[in-house]
Image: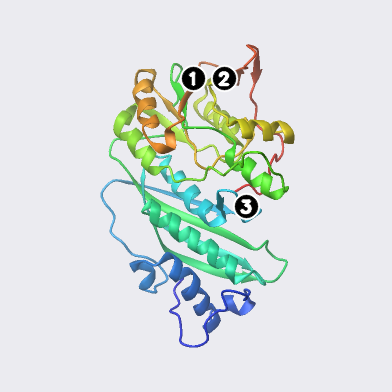
């Protein structure tokens, strides 16, 4: 986003649509960037109008992540693709225990996309980034022919700083460790699916999309090196994330179904749709594997934060050469929680 807005006719932000000229590098593109993206993301780095952002960083190890967002529909109960892009990217940095610093954002926009909707998405991103204290400092815009995209796709990157002495990694889980979950699961996936399929419930299901870095900071301050790893269970849900951890660390995981928080309306929706909440995507929850000695103190710290109020101890790490994830069911039986076979909910984030 390196073009200064030129003088001349303003965009029709009420009824106008994206045209191929808005990606041509000329006057129309400069207006699109200036009137929509610069206005929404306004900060000193974007105002400089360069092809990159230069900034000072504090001492420490850096963390970096990149992600892409193709969710359908673009707007859903509790959020939209813009808010999701900011929160999801910040959370990937936070799972390293890092403090996110700055973000970049790249847009691929389909010809004919309504400027009013693009403005709403950009404003949502700007609000989310300011609320999180993580500025969007550089980016890019491309326009493709009608039918070559589905409205708008967003790619983001983020850099952050990891506190000295902290190392969180998926291969650090050990038998005897405890598995903590920050709150109820399945909200995001069900919210998106309900909008996609025009489903309505007695109680509306809202996406849980949220930036988790402040919760993570409180956890790191409380437990520090006693935290083995953290993950946000997005695509594939809690089931996929636990299987990833088990295979990375070459251990088994045992969880208790009764300990896993699921909102009643989400449970009802999953039953109606034939979905397992353990496989449904989340965008504002985290899993943490911690030493047994630190688990109670860390759980209390999580519950003291608004985004961890429903935090629960859901299981433990065990020795298992087969790396199985096993669950004790609410009826006292047991079952293997395996990876998904195929795509349960496509275009969910």
Residue 339, horizontal then vertical, whole percent: 65, 31
- Nearest the eye: 147 or 201: 201
The mark lying in front, picked from 2 and 1, is 2
The answer to whether residue 169 is visible is no
Which residue is label 3 attached to?
A: 71
Query: CB of mark 2 within 8 Å of CB of mark 1?
Result: no
Q: Which residue is mark 2?
A: 258
Left/right of residue 34 with respect to residue 329 in the rendered view: left
The residue located at (39%, 43%) in the rendering is: 213
The one of 317 and 133 positioned closer to us in this rendering: 133
Rounded to the nearest angstrom, the CA distance separating label 3 from label 2 is 31 Å
How far apart marks 1 and 3 lie (CA) works out to 33 Å
Counting residues from the start of the chain, the first of labels 2 and 1 encountered is 2
Residue 348 seen in this snapshot: yes
Which residue is nearer to you in this view: 251 or 115?
A: 115
Q: Secondary structure at mark 2?
A: helix
The image position of residue 347, as x and y in percent, is 66, 49
Q: Earlier in the sequence, mark 3 or mark 2?
A: 3
Residue at the image position 57 percent from the left and 54 percent from the top = 80
Q: Is residue 186 placed above or below 31 in the rendered structure?
A: above
Residue 317: which numbered mark, if any? 1
Q: Element under label 3?
A: loop
Q: Secondary structure at mark 1?
A: strand
């Amino acid at each position: 986003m390196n073009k200064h807005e030129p003088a001349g006719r303003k965009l029709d932000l009420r009824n106008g649509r994206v045209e191929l000229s808005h990606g041509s590098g000329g006057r129309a593109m400069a207006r699109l960037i200036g009137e929509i993206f610069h206005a929404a993301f306004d900060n000193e780095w974007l105002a400089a109008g360069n092809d990159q952002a230069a900034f000072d960083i504090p001492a420490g190890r850096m963390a970096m992540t990149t992600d892409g967002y193709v969710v359908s529909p673009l707007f859903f109960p509790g959020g939209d693709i813009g808010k999701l892009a900011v929160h999801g990217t910040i959370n990937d940095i936070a799972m390293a225990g890092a403090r996110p610093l700055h973000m970049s954002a790249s847009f691929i926009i389909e010809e004919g996309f309504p400027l009013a909707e693009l403005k709403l998405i950009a404003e949502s991103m700007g609000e989310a980034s300011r609320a999180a204290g993580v500025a969007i400092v550089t980016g890019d815009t491309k326009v493709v022919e009608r039918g070559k995209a589905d409205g708008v796709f967003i790619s983001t990157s983020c850099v952050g700083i990891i506190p000295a002495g902290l190392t969180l990694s998926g291969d650090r889980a050990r038998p005897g460790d405890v598995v903590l979950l920050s709150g109820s699961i399945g909200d995001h996936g069900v919210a998106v699916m309900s909008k996609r399929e025009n489903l309505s419930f007695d109680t509306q299901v809202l996406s849980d999309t949220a930036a988790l870095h402040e919760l993570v900071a409180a956890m790191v301050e409380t437990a520090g090196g006693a935290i083995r790893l953290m993950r946000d269970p997005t695509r594939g849900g809690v089931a996929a994330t636990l299987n990833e951890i088990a295979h990375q660390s070459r251990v088994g995981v045992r969880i208790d179904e009764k300990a896993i928080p699921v909102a009643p309306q989400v449970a009802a929706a999953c039953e109606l749709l034939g979905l397992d909440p353990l496989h449904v995507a989340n965008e504002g929850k985290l899993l943490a594997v911690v030493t047994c000695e630190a688990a109670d103190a860390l759980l209390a710290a999580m519950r003291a934060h608004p985004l961890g109020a429903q935090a629960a101890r859901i299981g433990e790490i065990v020795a298992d050469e087969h790396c199985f994830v096993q669950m004790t069911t609410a009826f006292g039986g047991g079952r293997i929680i395996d990876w998904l076979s195929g795509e349960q909910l496509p275009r969910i984030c």
